[in-house]
Image (cartoon, rainbow, N blue to C red):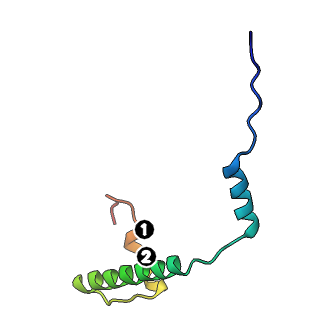
Amino acid sequence: MTQTRTRPSAGLIDDMEREDNRRGYEAEPEALASFHRLVKDLRLDGDRRAVLVGRRARRTRAEMTFTPASANSTVGEER
């Protein structure tokens, strides 16, 4: 005797996810504070590394995106 299976439907997890999505964004102060600590630590580490190689600790956006003409040439190209 064969038995037909019923089509799967949304379960409890799907219902919970829909309800959570309906409520929208929820601020998480602990996560935000943790993210800010991480960014601060990365910035300080980057500043330390820059000073070690003889650069100023902070650069402007223009300095970070500047590419000298020699950097645009291909490897092995004659000048």
Relative side of 27 to 56, left or right: right
- The vertical placement of 6 against 35, above or below, is above
| Occupied quadrant, residue 29 | bottom right
| Occupied quadrant, residue 56 | bottom left
Q: Amino acid at mark 2?
A: Thr
Distance, label 1 to label 2, CA atoms, is 7 Å
Q: Position of residue 14 (x, y in %)?
A: 70, 51
Disc on the earlier residue, 1 or 2: 2
Direction front: furthest residue: 1
Q: Position of residue 13 (x, y in %)?
A: 66, 51
Task: Tell me if label 1 and label 2 are in contact, CB under 8 Å.
Answer: yes
Q: Which residue is tagged 2?
A: 67
Q: Residue at x 38, y 60 (%)?
A: 74
Between residues 37 and 27, which one lies in front from this camera angle?
27
Between residues 26 and 5, which one lies in front from this camera angle?
5
Relative side of 60 to 41, left or right: right
Q: Secondary structure at mark 1?
A: helix
Q: Residue at x 42, y 68 (%)?
A: 72
Q: Position of residue 10 (x, y in %)?
A: 74, 45
Name the image quarter holding the C terminus: bottom left
Q: Secondary structure at mark 2?
A: loop
| Occupied quadrant, residue 34 | bottom left
Q: Which residue is tagged 1?
A: 72
Q: Residue at x 42, y 82 (%)?
A: 37
Crowding at mark 2 (Cα within 10 Å: few <14, some 14-19, many 20+):
few
Q: Amino acid at mark 1?
A: Asn
Direction left: furthest residue: 52
